[in-house]
Amino acid sequence: MANFNIFDIAGSGMNAQSVRLNLVASNIANANAVSGSLDTVYKSRQPVFASELKNLLDRQKPGSGVNVLGVVESQEPSVAEYAPYHPLADKDGYIYKPNVNTIEEMANMMSASRSYQNNVEVLNTAKELILQTLKMGK
């Protein structure tokens, strides 16, 4: 039977989008966290993806999956807010809030969710095509 590479590709895409959804959830959950110093404030985290080029270069498998290379913290500055009476305020009266943009995170969540759903549909379609092909042999 033919190579079932489509399942590997769609599975790697689902894994990548799952990582992305988990990071979005973490970012949204910490969007309103407050810290007393710039060193300890939560920073938005984003996944880094790469295509599996090795298989393409070796020409052993057609198509390419997705690798999650890692997670990086945003380099955007944190928000400093003057709140001298806040219990976490530093000596200058500032508290620090994360650099999480909830609107961006919601857009990322929608995109990741749709990408995940598309990969599930690819798996279901491939499964149905294989089942229909097997039925032709009856």
Image (cartoon, rainbow, N blue to C red):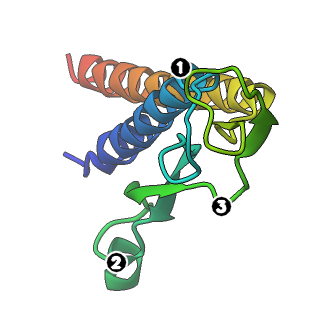
Q: In the image, what residue occupies the spot 39% across and 67% down?
A: 52
> Mark 1 or mark 3, which is nearer the start of the sequence?
1
Would you place residue 102 above or below residue 19 in this image?
above
Q: Nearer the viewer, residue 44 or 133?
A: 44
**Residue 124 percent across, percent down from the top left:** 41, 20
Residue of label 1: 29
- Does 95 sit left or right of 57 as displayed? right
**What's the CA distance linking mark 2 and mark 1?**
37 Å
x and y, in percent, of residue 62 in the image: 40, 64
Label 2 belongs to which residue? 54
> Badge 3: few (under 14), some or many (20 or more) residues near its Cα, within 10 Å?
few
Q: Which mark is residue 75?
A: 3
Precedes in sequence: disc 2 or disc 3: 2
Q: Amino acid at mark 1?
A: Ala
Of the 4 image quadrants, the one containing the C terminus is top left
Q: Give the crowd class for mark 1: few <14, some 14-19, many >=20 residues within 10 Å.
A: few
Image quarter for residue 43?
top right
Gap between marks 3 and 1 measured at Cα: 19 Å
Residue at 48 percent of width and 35 percent of height: 23
Q: Name which residue lies at 71% across and 45% down.
A: 92
- Counting from the top left corner in percent of width and height, residue 105 is at 69, 30
The amino acid type of the residue labelled 2 equals Lys
Q: Are marks 2 and 1 in contact (CB under 8 Å)?
A: no
Quadrant of the image occupied by residue 36: top right
Q: Residues within 10 Å of mark 2 (few under 14, many from 20)?
A: few
